[in-house]
Image: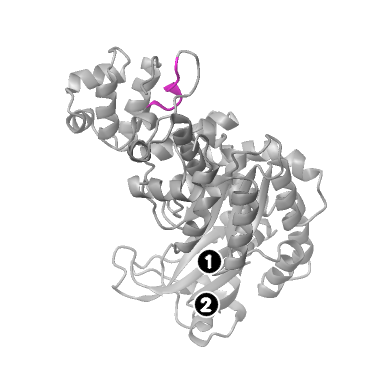
Amino acid sequence: MARLRKPTGQDLMRLDAIAKHLNVKSRFEDRSFGADVASACLARIAPVIDKLLPCAGEKIALGLGEHLCLTFEEVHGPHDIVELEDRYFRGKKEIGFAQLRGELRQPGVDALLFERMNAEERAPDRWVAVLNLQDTAAKAYWNRFHELSHRIAEPPQGILPFRRHQFEASNPVEALIDSVAAEFAFYGPAFRPIVQRLAMRNSLNFEVIEAIRDSYAPSASLLATIKAVVKYWPRPAAAITAEFRGRVNSRDEDQALRVTPQGYNDAAGLARLAFFPNMRVPQGAPIDLAFQTGVAQDSLEHLGDWTTSQGKGLTPLDVRTAARRLGSRVYAVVSL
Amino acid sequence: MLPEKYDRIEVGRRIKRLRQTQDITAQELAKRSRVSAGYLSEVERGLSAVSVDKLMQIAEGLGLSLDDLLGEATKTVSGENVIPIPAALSAAADQLNLSHRATLTLLQGQRSLTARRSKAEQGEWGVDEWIRFYDQVKNYLPDC
């Protein structure tokens, strides 16, 4: 996970506005702030989702969008841009949509959120989130919930003295919104029973993760699904990724296959199952084998074999590691 | 447009908190803002009435606009939010001889894109960008 940068003045004002909007008493500086904001959002929105249950993630996104007057539009190619311009710019005289083509021409734009000027207050498309899926659809599911979470957590934009433009993983506001999105994208009362039912008869591996993804959120990314499954897995579990890179402070130095912890469940904390960020993967470990051979691994290993360059070791646990390489990255789940 | 009234104590607190969050000492902010440290201290404690010019200097020292600095304190006596028009839009409106209403509609249109999720940073629009936007939407503006 990206290290958060220090909040700027604008970040701080947005964080304060979120706290005020949700009636959260803590402030960004307080340890409990993230959890307090997520709880406040859940308290507001859970009754809406609970009416939809039992259902899967995609339906929750649609139901929340309806509740929040937010419509999702997907752009897969130039024809979709033309269609949206016709519908909103020329059809509904929403001049903001004149920016659509130019925005989507820029590299790295994942989503745009419009608040329509000419919409009735409760119009179902008062807010329009345009998801740019021209290069990849991998983030579509998560971006839906991210945009919904902005609508849930933040006061209406008109009240704010600033606009949000940029997403960076290290941005403290976006990280906060992502933590809210995690609550809704894999909503506990709907998602936990699916995970726990499969956990009764299976160990944690990618077949189980894929089965859960297929039944709950087929369009979710692998990483988002892994993190959510680990969170609700009833036994100690960790999600990690690994890439070939150098030291934290000197990316070109001492390059090796190194891990990034992506998430743990509460049981992992009790079992002291944890990895040091950026530690090397030992040669011959399942993650290393998946990286070297490209063949998915699912086997037992002893974490006592993992040590840092300073000689620090992991808790010597016997664990099961499932690892799969996609591109230059290895995704892994480690469980007891 | 300048706020006719604002909460002096609230603004002072806000300045202090923003300064502390950015790890800037009062002396450093005073230097950046081209005001004396004693004056800044009084402003932060809400003891001193502060002119808009000085507030703009302090906002600049904090890397913010006056609008950002004042936030919700930016209300007129009637309670309505002040709508600041960016300097570049103002210059474009002068060039294009736009009415106030058309200028505000242009601003509202641009701001109806409330968020973009992107790794790339986007700066404020310059005069040329406002004129280009005007050319695209002029048939939908009032009084045009």
Please give the name of the residue rendered at 29% of the width and 34% of the height, measured from the top-left corner: B62
Q: Nearer the viewer, residue A193 or A57?
A: A57
Residue B140 included in the magenta stretch of the image: no
Q: Position of residue A89 (x, y in %)?
A: 59, 50
Amino acid at dot 1: Ile
Q: CA distance from mark 2 to mark 1?
A: 10 Å
- Residue A222 or residue A72, whichever sits in front: A72
Residue at the image position 18 percent from the left and 23 percent from the top: B37
Q: Position of residue A206 (x, y in %)?
A: 66, 73
Where is residue A258 drawn, in percent x and y? Answer: 42, 71
Does residue A24 appear in the picture of this structure?
no
- The relative height of residue B108 versus residue A318 in the rendered view (above or below) is above
Mark toward the start of the polypeptide (2 vs 1):
1
Q: Is residue B75 magenta?
A: yes
Name the chain letter of the residue that bears numbered label 1. Answer: A
Which residue, given by chain and number where applicable, does mark 1 sit on?
A240
The residue wearing badge 2 is A287
Q: Residues within 10 Å of mark 1 (few under 14, many from 20)?
A: many
Are discs 2 and 1 both within one chain? yes
